[in-house]
Image (cartoon, rainbow, N blue to C red):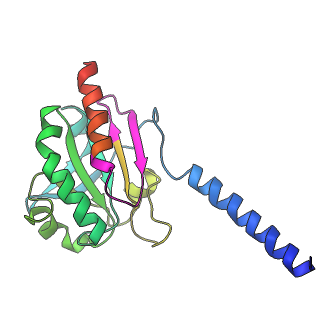
Amino acid sequence: MTASSKALICAGVALAALAAAAGAQAALSQGDMAPDFTAPAFLGGAPFTFKLADALKKGPVVVYFFPAAYTKGCQIEAHLFADAADDFKKDGATVIGVTAGNTDKLQEFSKDTLYCSGKFAMAADTDLKIATSYKATLALKPGWSDRTSYVIAPSGKIVLDYSDLKPDDHVAKTLAAVQQLHDAH
């Protein structure tokens, strides 16, 4: 084995270890206190200010971060959350989507009948502060949020953290966690 081959292998091992360490810290974990936030938001196209502390007074909150409005995976995920909106409400949960990407399109996205249908709120994280505090930033595209979902109990503690760029399972996992919270009370 040549010296350059050994150096490449060592560099690869170091990068893999670094990526694993970064991945291990990619999200907040179950039991952590959720960072409080206030953000400009839209519900059915109508602007308002979303305050996590106020929402938690009413019940659990699903905070789902997504990369950007009107991108394929985000459209799928928003549609799935809209379809399940009544189930979340039945269990007393508030759903809020949060993104740092394409925030100029959130007002329209929040009322678009193909996606959100005005069934849950969308918040703009224009400076990426919320996603950063939740460790939900997208490494592949700086300045955008990752696809990470949290269920936060009324106490402010995280009861579910789930991160996957595929949008398919976020709704099922968050709904199951909300239902467990509801059944426990």
**Percent position of residue 97, x then y:** 25, 55
Would you say residue 13 is visible in this rendering?
A: yes
Q: Image quadrant of residue 72?
A: bottom left
**Percent position of residue 146, x then y:** 41, 61
Would you say residue 49 is visible in this rendering?
A: no
Q: Image quadrant of residue 57?
A: top left
- Closer-to-camera residue (30/143): 30
Q: Image quadrant of residue 131?
A: bottom left
Q: Is residue 89 left or right of residue 97?
A: left
Q: Is residue 184 left or right of residue 136?
A: left
Rendered residue at 92%/80% (across/down): 2
- Closer-to-camera residue (120/131): 120
Looking at the rendering, the stretch of residues picked out in magenta corresponds to 151-171
Judged from this view, the residue extending furthest toward the front is: 1
Q: Is residue 37 left or right of residue 8?
A: left
Judged from this view, the residue extending furthest toward the top is: 185
Rendered residue at 28%/27% (across/down): 181
**Percent position of residue 79, x then y:** 18, 58
Residue 166 located within the stretch drawn in magenta: yes
Task: Please determine whether, in this image, residue 176 is positioned above or below residue 112.
Answer: above
Rendered residue at 28%/73% (across/down): 102
**Percent position of residue 88, x then y:** 18, 39
Task: Please determine whether, in this image, residue 35 is positioned above or below residue 108.
Answer: above
